[in-house]
Image: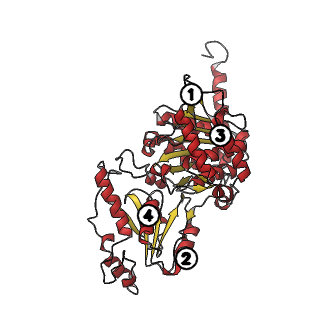
Amino acid sequence: QLQKEEVMTAKEVRTYISEFTAHLEEELTASKEIDKLNIPRFMPELWSSFPFPEDKDFAVEVTTGVSRKTIDILWGHMNNLPEDKSFFSKVHKILSDRQKMFDKGKVDWAMGELLAYATLVNDGHPVRLSGQDSERGTFAHRHASFAQEDVRERYMPLRDSTNFEASFNAYNSPLSEYGVMGFEYGYALAAPNGLTIWEAQFGDFHNVAQVIIDQYISSAEEKWGLLNGLVLYLPHGYEGQGPEHSSARIERFLTISARNNMFVMNPTTPSNLFHALRRHLKREIRIPMIIFTPKSLLRHPRCISSLDDLENGHFEEVIDDNDVDIESVTRLVFCSGKIYYELLERKEELKARDVAIVRIEQIHPFPKEKMETIIAKYSSALLTLWVQEEPENMGAWTYINNNMQEHHIVPIARLASASPATGLAKLHTLGQQEIINKVFKPCHCNNKLPYCNLDCVEGKSRKEILKQHHYFANPTRFSI
């Protein structure tokens, strides 16, 4: 075209091509002399102050507690409605119930979550949450915005109050996980100082956006040196809702977890969620964070934290059992997520202070040192168990086993399955009960105890112990 328009001659075109080819060859030859590859920063004007994370960065403790005075002030801003707007009576009841709990010095999951957002925007960090029914919350727990009577406009306290330093926005997104998660990844890329969250309606709905997770969230840093702090909320837990509404596929994320590429968390208390979100922005590093959020725990009477926990606490990667006789512990139980509360209920029912139930709240990066400390603490334990609701080929078991190979840990889980859960509620209940019963096995010896505390097998070999607890090695375990 340039020749037709007489801008360049054919000879000049050949000369330019030849010169450019020679330049490329020179650069290629020079590159072979460089021992170390230097990947330039993407969007350096935004990311130059954030280092590429190293192992030492994950050991840095940052202050995430917020003073009670500040919490009280922020709560007053976020739990009040403007007098010039009209709201339904149910809205007033929601705020009234929350105020009663706050006055008792306690917070549930929604309150802890919203207070985390409030403290962050108060510190100047913008917060953005989008997902399927994220304003109210799929399980009607969050209520980040409220409908008004007679008008379509919704009131969002953290957004519409003029008392916060940075912006807050919550959006109900279309049912297009691939498109929305990709958009939020890009948004987080442009806002490294903010908290950007994508929430699935149910955890396994992320499978429609698997390409975003595989190509960007899990591997972009290693492939391209691309940092990103996007947070995913994936509701997870076995409550008998069927194969498509139970598992957020923890195993998939752990399969692609390596070299500290992302946080994988399964928190069990409102305060730990509070501190996890604040730690995510208060540290100097930015990597994606996958949080498996609860469903039934949103209203569980034991899933409560104190305001003191928000003020003086910190994120706990591993939560030890504080109700044990350390020297008499014969059974050490590791678990993660909702199953803890079911184990705790049975333990308290049996007054089993010789059973230690330890929660792993951060699964990746794996808290190896803390796990070793726990195991050393309970040196009298005859059995060390990993308990999960998921089938044995799913959940965190394979990852836990790979990271703790020097210890003999016995899994208690549903039988390996192609489906993550049963579609029959009664069968689910039977399976859940069997998991709990395997941890607190009935006593069949002459001691006639409420549960087997392994007294009768003290001094025997581990092989004999496992043989007595035949269900651990039984290949015909239930398939539910």
Q: How far is the residue under mark 3 from the one under mark 2?
A: 43 Å
> At 45% across and 59% down in the image, what residue appears?
396
- Whether residue 399 sits left or right of residue 75 in the image: it is left
Asked where in the image residue 271 lies, by quadrant, the reply is bottom right
Q: Which mark is residue 78?
A: 3
Q: Which mark is residue 203?
A: none
Q: Specify which label sits upstream in the sequence, 3 or 4.
A: 3
Residue 256 lies, in percent from the top left, at: 49, 53
Front in this rendered view, residue 148 or 285: 148
Q: Specify which label sits upstream in the sequence, 3 or 2.
A: 3
Give the labeled residue for mark 4. 345
The amino acid type of the residue labelled 1 equals Gln
Give the labeled residue for mark 2. 377
Mark 2: few/some/many CA within 10 Å (<14, 14-19, 20+): few
- Secondary structure under the numbered disc 2 in the rendered image: helix
- Secondary structure under the numbered disc 3 in the rendered image: helix
> At 33% across and 70% down in the image, what residue appears?
472
Residue 331 at least partly seen: yes
The amino acid type of the residue labelled 4 equals Glu
